[in-house]
Image: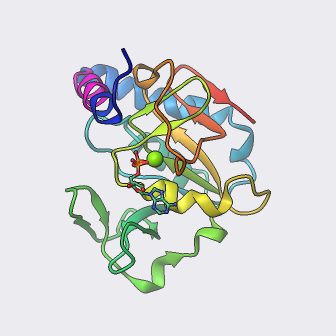
Amino acid sequence: MTLSRQDLRKIIRQKRNSLSSDVQYLAGLDLVTQFKQLAEITSAQHIALYITADGEIDTKPLIEWLWQQGKEVYLPVIHPFSHGHLLFLRYASNTPMVLNQYAIAEPKLDQTQIIPVAQLDLICTPLVAFDANGHRLGMGGGYYDRTLEPWFDSKQGPKAIGLAHDCQQVDSLPIESWDVPLPKIVTPSQIWDWE
Ligand SMILES: Nc1ncnc2c1ncn2[C@@H]1O[C@H](COP(=O)(O)OP(=O)(O)O)[C@@H](O)[C@H]1O
Ligand SMILES: [Mg+2]
């Protein structure tokens, strides 16, 4: 039986939300260990992350490690008038935060802190499920498909890296024409590379 995208989202979201706080905590630390091995990290200076919600892998240790390395960290903000699009704003420990329409924390809109997507080196994307080919299923908003579409298959611009718990992997996903696959996905146990 093939599960629909909506069914898969429901099942995997339940799975990741049921991870214990100990497992969540260790997963966040393991993510940092994996990033230390990531080839792209040395030359990357401008890195987009996201604030964890809904049982997603804890990005806080990674963000703090990147700050310690002198990297600039950015977070997505839902675009105020370009429907379905994201802006990326610089994130520092004193950045004023607000909750967006999905109750996810995002930097308070401040034009002086916006970075053009073209200037990002890495975009770390959240995801609900991924498969053995790097296909990505998100929460259903299509935000990262729209963000990454201009850069897919391009030597220039940001490189996408998916972040996930190991339990978010499935054998195969029902894919739509607009879904942008990920060249790399990092989980606590390994770096998946499809380049
Ligand atoms: N590049 C794009 N341009 C326009 N619409 C898009 C684009 N990418 C995705 N969408 C739209 O966004 C919606 C959600 O996409 P979907 O792939 O289901 O979400 P997610 O990637 O978050 O799982 C779909 O209705 C799709 O048509
Ligand atoms: Mg998609």
Residue, x 49% and y 47% (percent of image)? 125
Above/below status of 190 relative to 1: below
Examine the image and state in which quarter residue 37 appears: top right
Give the farthest residue toward the top.
1
**178 and 67: which one is in front?**
178
Give the total of numbered labels: 0
Reply above or below: 7 against 127: above
Question: Left or right: where does residue 165 sit relative to residue 54?
Answer: right
Direction bottom: furthest residue:
112
Boundaries of the magenta span: 10-19
Q: Position of residue 185 (x, y in %)?
A: 58, 34
Give x and y (percent) for residue 160. 61, 49
Left or right: 90 as drawn, with respect to 17? right
Quadrant of the image containing the C terminus? top right
Q: Is residue 18 shown in magenta? A: yes
Q: How is the image coloured?
A: rainbow
Q: Quadrant of the N terminus?
A: top left
Please tell me in which quadrant of the rendered image residue 38 appears.
top right
Say whether residue 188 is magenta. Answer: no
Residue in the image at 29% along x and 36% along y: 6
Which is more toward the observer, 82 or 18? 82
